[in-house]
Image: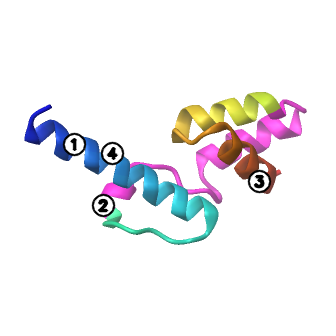
């Protein structure tokens, strides 16, 4: 892996970590520009999609969508979806 690939990977991980911090209420840790590419939990499209799935009784699908969009693990996704619903 060359330096450019490492820097891209670090930027991706920072975006994911920022998103996790925002989703759990701890706040962002790196620049806002990098984190703007990840959804914030609140009134955004991801939350609306999750709430729609929960409203239709599709909790497992909501967790799956949350995991796919955020890259978090099963437990984290389940906890986040339960906080939204």
Label 3 residue SS? helix
User: Which residue position holds label 4?
Assistant: 12
Secondary element under disc 2, as helix, strand or loop, is helix
Toward the right, the furthest residue is 57
Residue at the spot x=75%, y=28% of the render?
Answer: 61
Vertical side of 76 occupied by 29: above or below: below
Mark 4 or mark 3: whose residue is earlier in sequence:
4
| Residues at discs 3 and 1 in contact (Cβ within 8 Å) | no
Specify whether residue 2 is painted magenta.
no
x then y, percent, for residue 23: 60, 59
Asked whether 55 falls inside the magenta stretch, the response is yes
* Bounds of the magenta segment: 33-59
Assess whether mark 1 and mark 4 are in contact (beta carbons under 8 angstroms). Answer: yes
The residue shown at (44%, 59%) is: 18
**3D distance between C-alphas at marks 3 and 2:** 25 Å
Residue 3 is situated, as x and y percent measured from the top left of the image, at 9, 41
Disc 1 residue crowd, few under 14, some 14–19, many 20+, Cα 10 Å: few
Q: CA distance from mark 3 to mark 1?
A: 31 Å
Q: What number of labels is visible?
A: 4
Is there CB contact under 8 Å for labels 2 and 1? no
Tell us which disc is closer to us: 2 or 1.
Answer: 1
Give the labeled residue for mark 1.
Answer: 8
Give the Cα separation between the discs numbered 4 and 3: 25 Å
Compared across the picture, whether 16 is left or right of 63 comes to left
The N terminus lies in quadrant: top left
Q: Secondary structure at mark 4?
A: helix
Q: Residues within 10 Å of mark 4 (few under 14, many from 20)?
A: some
Sort mark 2 into few (<14), some (14-19) or many (20+) by Cα contacts within 10 Å. Answer: few
| Distance CA(mark 2)–CA(mark 4) | 12 Å
Q: Secondary structure at mark 1?
A: helix
Which residue corresponds to mark 2?
33
């Amino acid at each position: 892996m060359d330096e450019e690939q490492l820097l891209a990977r670090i930027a991706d991980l920072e975006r994911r970590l920022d998103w996790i911090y925002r989703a759990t209420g701890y706040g962002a840790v790196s620049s806002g520009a990098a984190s703007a590419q990840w959804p914030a939990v609140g009134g955004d499209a991801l939350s609306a999609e999750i709430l729609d799935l929960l409203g239709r009784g599709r909790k497992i699908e909501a967790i799956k969508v949350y995991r796919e969009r955020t890259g978090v693990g099963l437990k984290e996704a389940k906890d986040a979806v339960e906080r939204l619903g």
